[in-house]
Image: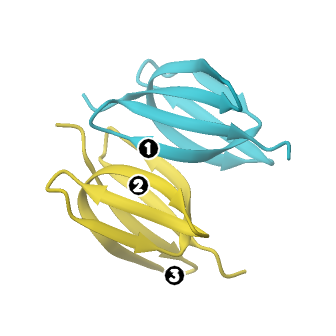
Chain colours: A yellow, B cyan
Amino acid sequence: MCEANAYLISENEKILVMEAVDTVEPEEGGLKLVNIFGEQKFVKAHIHSLFLVDHNIYLKSETK
Amino acid sequence: MCEANAYLISENEKILVMEAVDTVEPEEGGLKLVNIFGEQKFVKAHIHSLFLVDHNIYLKSETK
């Protein structure tokens, strides 16, 4: 399977938001994450960067 | 391996930008894509959505 772990990153933090993420889609000023178990999570952030071979997705908060 | 294909999407188009993408990182107002073969590509876009189990990454142009 090709799921990844989604982390919310800020200046000096990296918080695990969801494991085994399958889809990430924009929704109402944020992102809807769905993992391979069908669990959903809404995060007020955008997709910052991807490291797929390492199974990592980095999200960044919308706050400036 | 957990690479994915990156597509640039617009209103009614879906253009394959790069296959077997490993990393996507922001760079100078766009994105730097690197695939598992070490090939690099710069795209003036942001990451729109992810469908990892299907191996698809959708990018959207920065133009409004």
Pick whichever, B63 or A19, lies toward us.
B63
On the same chain, marks 3 and 1? The answer is no
| Three-letter code for the amino acid on which mark 3 is drawn | Asn
Mark count: 3
User: Residue A5 in the image: x percent, y percent?
Assistant: 29, 58
Q: Which residue is mark 3?
A: A12
- Quadrant assignment for the C terminus of chain A: bottom right
User: Residue B51 in the image: x percent, y percent?
Assistant: 37, 40
B9 on left or right of B64 = left
Pick whichever, B2 or A11, lies toward us.
B2
Cβ atoms at labels 1 and 2 below 8 Å apart: yes
The secondary structure type at the circle numbered 1 is strand
Tell me where residue B30 sits by quadrant: top right
Return the mark for residue A57: 2
| Three-letter code for the amino acid on which mark 1 is drawn | Leu
Q: Which residue is mark 1?
A: B50
Pick whichever, B22 or B19, lies toward us.
B19
How would you rate the neighbour count of disc 2 (Cα within 10 Å): few for under 14, some for 14-19, many for 20 or more?
many
Say whether disc 3 or disc 2 marks the residue closer to the N-terminus: 3
The secondary structure type at the circle numbered 3 is loop
Q: Chain of mark 2?
A: A
Instruction: Report the Cα–Cα distance between label 3 and label 2.
Output: 17 Å
Tell me where residue A60 sits by quadrant: bottom right
